[in-house]
Image (tube, helix red, strand yellow):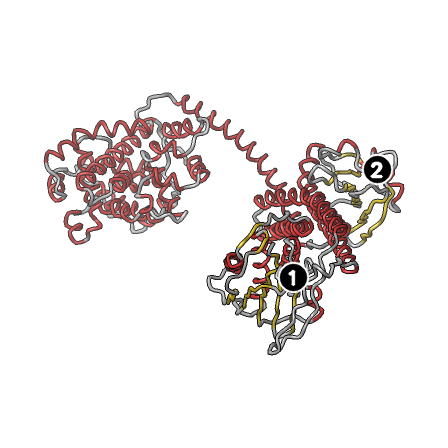
Amino acid sequence: MPQTPPDKTIAPQIELAVRQLDALSILPATAAKYFSKLLQPQASPLDMAEIIEAGPAMTAKVFSLVHEKKIRPADIKFSIRNALEKLPEDIVRKAIFSFKLYQTPDNQPRLEFRKQLLLHSLATACCAAEIAKIISPQMEPNLAYSAGLLHNLGALALDQAMPRSFETIVEQAKSQNTCLCEIEQKHLGTDHTILGKRLARKWHLPEQVILAIWLHHSDTTTISQKMPQARIAQIVQLADLIARQGGIGQSGSYEPTDSAEQIATSLQIAPAQLEQIHNDLPGKTQEKAKLLGLDSQRPQSYYLDVFHTAAAQLARSNAEISQANRQLQTTATHLQFVKDLLLDMDANTAPIDTAQKLAVHWQRFFQTGMVCLYLTPLSISHVLEAVLAQDPRTVKTICLNSPIENPPIPQPMQEKFAVLDANQYCDWLFEQLDVDFDPDQTKIIPLFPNGRAVGAIVFELRYPTKTEDLNENFKLAASIAGIILDMAFATANQQNLAENFAQLLTATKQSPLQVSEETAPPEPQPTADEDISPAPTTSEIPTTDLLSALAEVAAGAAHELNNPLSVISGRVQLLAKSLQDPQAKQMLQQIQQSAAELSGIIDDMMNFAQPPQPKPQMSNIKTIIDEAIQLTAQKQNKEQLDIQIEITEGLEDVFVDSAQVVSALSNILCNSLESYDQGTGPVKVTAEPEDSGNLIQLQITDSGCGMDAQTLQKAAQPFFSARPAGRKRGMGLAHAQRIIQLNGGFLTIQSSPDIGTIVTILLPRR
């Protein structure tokens, strides 16, 4: 080595060479240990925690990953095992496979030197952990272990970046019985503690570990007195000296180790404890060395076999990953198709209009030629609605005559998804179109979301692809298209049923129930001081025949709609779980909410047309009113309601189904409260005998917004509400009137705008 002072340009060059290292290299024996573990079935990085925490290279990499993933070292308590639990497995696996093997220019001798450096680092780590346990709780043993393991980071980096020069420097330090840092400064203008500190900062190692790397050759006793956080360096320095006294491994430094007892005294470690550490250290170090394979004497061929096995398994894994990536790309394509399609849809779009949008998106997204999408009707019909898209700008709706000999959905695809050649099944279709599909390039696929095909799509496939790939490419998209069409059919059916329902209500209004004079309730008269003009009573309850018709319509709705709505809701939930795009998820949630709303409407229709038969018994009128007010408070989600009750003393009981009447009164009270802006009242409830003596009269009076004549006339009709968009379904008064009538009572309403409303209810006493 030259004896003259080093060129000032050498230190920056050395630092640059060291800082270019992304990680420490590992020995072939250590790599074999890693790969052998990873090759085991269902192995995870956590299963390798013992091996990983025994190696400086992997420990440094784990701390770097902890910083990269923004995990605080304190959160893992400087434990490599804790860090592996928080880090993603794929990231750790990638790090393991990214390590380079230690390169030796003269093979075995250099390999042995590297082993000795690692063995000394292991001994220092084990010793530092034992010291930390003795002085606990002043020091975390996991931190002391990691700091000891990495204290010689700079020396390991120099040995990797410039192996021959570093070996020469170590030999000179040995011949002069001096510290390695002194020789490094003499020839390099820097030393391994400074280089290690800078490399550790680049790799974002914990600050306490960096202090140990930097200061472990300094006067740590004096430094730690003025800088308590440097105590970790004092512990590592003592551990380094003890490992050197025991002759475990090679540190590169050869200065005297007689300062160990002085440092131990400063750390308040008793001589007996120090002796115990000395005695236990070789065994503990040997256990860790076996994990890294530092004791291995196996030939080079063994490592080659392990690496070949690992490479073969990685090749298989890569093939599987490539296949999975292709599937993910296909799924991503389909999800983009679904997203674009959902954003273009409307909940109230008719089935044929939905089909038109589907055809355009299909043609544009899958780059097909002409597309014909036809719908299969729910009822028996020979006329099919269809859409023909020659290109995205030339789209028209047409009617087709269904084939008489064969069903419009080919037999092979009626019960399962299939992609078929259209030229074998679609002659009837081609004959009716005024455009010419290329029969050899045209395919047909079904659109069936719940076991029944709602249609089929015929399209020109203008690019070559394997038959098995066709199913993979189009099955998901066709299923989604079928769900959307099925929902459009369900919406259309609901609208048709609602129209039929409205027609029955109109017929009801034109044919009111005739009431005999003996049972007809008296017309309520306002008092002289009330400024509420008489208003028309609500329409009478439908006759028995008309109610039967309503029940039949509602039952048909339940049968025809509830099952497909359940399927739609279930499929939409499954699809939403697989989507990440927030807009698409929001659209699917809207579809699910619409399906739930339709089911709710059907339930309301059934409850109105076929409510449970009442089970009347003698019931206390005050108890009924109190329970109705409690139920109203729950519905309105309010603790305090301004409701005044006046009941004639000694009022007799009523003969009704009390639960049903409570529900009816609660509906009326809710309407009264909602006539106020604040929704809390006041509302007055009175109960007194009716003049005939056979009935009890209840009156619910509010001073809210009131109703005009037209609104009042429809107030108790099902699904009527005077509220704007976002209103409730408008079944409250309809249910109330229906229940009161079933219990042998009567209900009338008087109201005037801006003055208020009076609801009069007559209930039987027997």
Quarter that holds the N terminus? top left
The picture quadrant where one finds residue 378 is top right
Q: Position of residue 392 (x, y in %)?
A: 77, 52
Q: SS for tag 1?
A: strand
Q: Amino acid at mark 1?
A: Leu
In the image, residue 202 above or below residue 132: below
Q: Residue furthest front?
A: 693
Residue 300's x, y, as percent?
39, 23
Give the label, 2 or 1, closer to the camera.
Answer: 1
The residue under label 2 is 426
| Residue 733 to residue 327: above or below | below
Q: Position of residue 266 (x, y in %)?
A: 12, 44
Asked if residue 207 shows in the view, the reply is yes
Mark earlier in primary sequence (2, 1): 2
Left or right side of 154 for 629: right
Q: Nearer the viewer, residue 164 or 599?
A: 599
- Residue drawn where x is 21% and y is 28% of the image: 282
Amino acid, disc 2: Cys
Tell me, for residue 444, which label it has, or none: none
- Left or right of residue 594, residue 80 in this image: left
Residue at 47% x, 25% y is 309
The reply to whether residue 339 is in sight is no
**Residue 29 to residue 194: above or below:** above
Count of numbered circles on the image:
2
Give the class, few, some or many, for how many residues have Cα within 10 Å of label 1's Cα (few <14, many ≥20).
many
Residue 668 or residue 440, whichever sits in front: 668
Image quadrant of residue 413? Answer: top right
Q: From mark 2 to mark 1, how far is it between C-alphas?
A: 62 Å
Q: Nearer the viewer, residue 109 or 456?
A: 456
What mark, if any, has residue 747 been given in the picture?
Answer: 1
Other-residue count near label 2 (Cα within 10 Å), few / some / many at <14 / 14–19 / ≥20: some
